[in-house]
Image: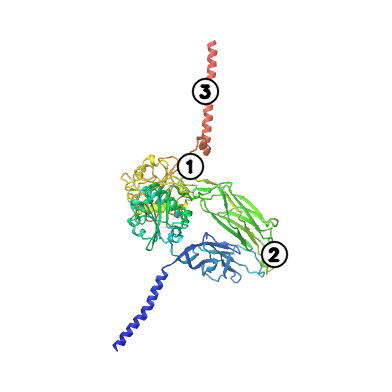
Amino acid sequence: MKQWIKMGLILAFLSMSVPMLAHAEGEEAAADKETFITNFQSTKSSLVGSAPTSSLYFKLLDYWDVDQVTLNLDYNVSQLTKNEASSITISVNGTKFYSFRPTESTQERQSLTLEIPKDLLRKGENELKVEGVIVTKETQDVCSVTQSAADWLHIYNGSNVGVAYTKQPMSTTIQQFNSYFGGMDTTIQKKVAVLVPDKANETELQSAVYALSGYAKKNETDGATIPVSTFSDTSSMGLPYTIVVAEYKNLPTEYQSKIDAEKVEKDAVIQLLKIENKAVLIVTSNDPKALIKAGRFVANDELMSQISSDQKVVTTTTETASQPLKINDELALTKTGDEVRGAGHQEKKYFMSLPANRSIAENSEVNLAFRYAKNLDFDRSLVTVSINDIPIGSKKLNKEYADSDTVSFKTPADLSVVGNYTVTVSFDLEMQSVPCVADSSQTPWAYIAPESTLLINTQDRTDLLFQNYPFPFLQDGSYNQIGIVLPDKMDQNYYQSLTNVINLLGKYAEDNTGIVKFFPTTATKADLKNYNLILMGSPKDNPVIKSLNKELYFQYDKAGNGFVSNEKLSIESDYGKQIGTGQLIHSPYNEGSGALILTGATSETVYLASKEMASQISVSKHSGDAFVIDKDKNSYVYRFKKSEDIGEKKTFVEKVQKNSTITIYLLAVTLVGISVIVGLFLAFRKNRKIKGDYDEK
């Protein structure tokens, strides 16, 4: 009997263990699955009209094995919508795959979760479009297409596309490492880092910054950063994908043994190592110039994506420069041509970019080549071109030119466009009265030809303000003679501060040819004279900042313990020790250069200030030339300079022309002066004549 009881207990235990083991195995398998979310872009207002549309562009990376793609749609339609006559249709890459009718609901927000068919997707960029047919009128004429302001569909910012995927195993090639390290998912998931020795020298930091900049440019998520850290940071050293930049003598022993010492005497080696579950890219040399050149090579995505081996030797003759940004050129709106189809308002958006310190100048021009259907009501059909939703011109469509039409619009003088911008081509394809059941061949359409271009001219924005950042540190998309001075002793806060600044600058940099140079705190005025400076630290750990205290808008007390009050802000002594500041000042060493000072009494407060320089959104909040932030994230913006321009030096005549008040004043002074001189001359002449007459007598 006891044996049977024992057997029963064993069987019961096994019966409970099997599902537990299966569940554990399932968890282990699921651990490899990852999810990436892409939110809808430019969802800032309701989409008005009887046939509103909204698009989302999302990417599928080459190394993803996609399991499932899901649309999560949060929307609302007009409360007057006639649900039985209205519909919403979803398409991906031009193929419609799902339609539904809005449901009657008193709630402001409705939700839809929908799986997107995998066979409609492609590697790279995909377009998902939401198209609505919103009917709000009671009418006997079901063919009525008259629309009103009550016809609208709103898509909320929370709407997104989620991709569930597993990563393909990474091969031992540099090109594959380049893809994984630069992938948008690995950066957001914090699986990457650039590592340098604990006491990195100026050469190692310079090379690391170049390498980091190349990947920061590929990172499309604002605020997601690739950290710069040190070998002693065990959490960073253990990440799945790391780039190690160091002189050969400073490499950890385990890495030195993997690289031929003879190869790094005069050249640099870029070596990929697979160590357990980590991929490590070593960038090393004994020659400082070669190490810097190797950093530039890593920053060139085109070159890195072509290396099908695990090693690259960079010599003095190796070409490393990437293609410079063309900022005064003809840019194609579309490479292959784009079609829009359907009655009513239809549009295509084209996303462009400029360096943040340049704006579109006068005489820029959109040249549109297009064609369209011949069955339109040409009295009411037209094409409109807008830049950042500001119309710059419209043209009525004409049946005579339907097979090949062109139009050119010049940008207006008051168009203020900086950084990323959108060119929108809109068609209003109005139909003549048609029967209720229309022949599908009569569907109106328009086509934007590949010959369509944007002829763009740009101009520098040379005011030394945060709203024009990254000026003066970038020029025409290249690093503009940047000199960086870090504290004598670097801790994790300072490396995080460097991370924040370089990631955003790298996002703006379009090529790898500019100069970023690191200087010790013992650098002289002559050393720093020709550079736009970035200084980090406090007066106690960065002597350069201490020497510039009188030049700062927010200055330290004599002991350098904290900030003191000024004309803009009263600062209590303890509070002055707890705040960080960012200040854009004229370089005291060069009238034509600028300096960004990120400073605070401690490394923690410097890090607080640097976080304001980590994303485009955070920088855009600062419109002046100085800001203060405290540990409670209270931020205050100030403007001190009256004259901000540090561009090319102007002649006296140019300065007078720029300032009409000075011109009027100088003219008045000149006229008065001339009048006085003439008066004195006449008086003197008259005096002489009188005296002469007197002498004659």
**How busy is the neighbourhood of tag 1: few (under 14 within 10 Å), some, or many (20 plus)?**
some
State which tag comes first along the sequence, 2 or 1: 2
Looking at the rendered structure, the kind of residue marked 2 is: Ser
| Residue, disc 3 | 680
> x, y percentage for residue 414?
56, 48
The reply to whether residue 579 is in sight is no
Give the quarter of the figure containing the N terminus: bottom left
Looking at the rendered structure, the kind of residue marked 3 is: Leu
Would you identify the image quadrant in which residue 131 lies?
Answer: bottom right
Q: Nearer the viewer, residue 124 or 393?
A: 124
Q: Nearer the viewer, residue 406 or 238?
A: 238
**How many angstroms separate mark 2 from mark 1 (CA)?**
60 Å
Q: Under tag 3, what secondary structure? A: helix
Mark 2 touching mark 1, by CB under 8 A?
A: no
User: Looking at the image, is 589 positioned above or below residue 611?
Assistant: above
| Residue, disc 1 | 647
**How many angstroms separate mark 3 from mark 2 (CA)?**
88 Å
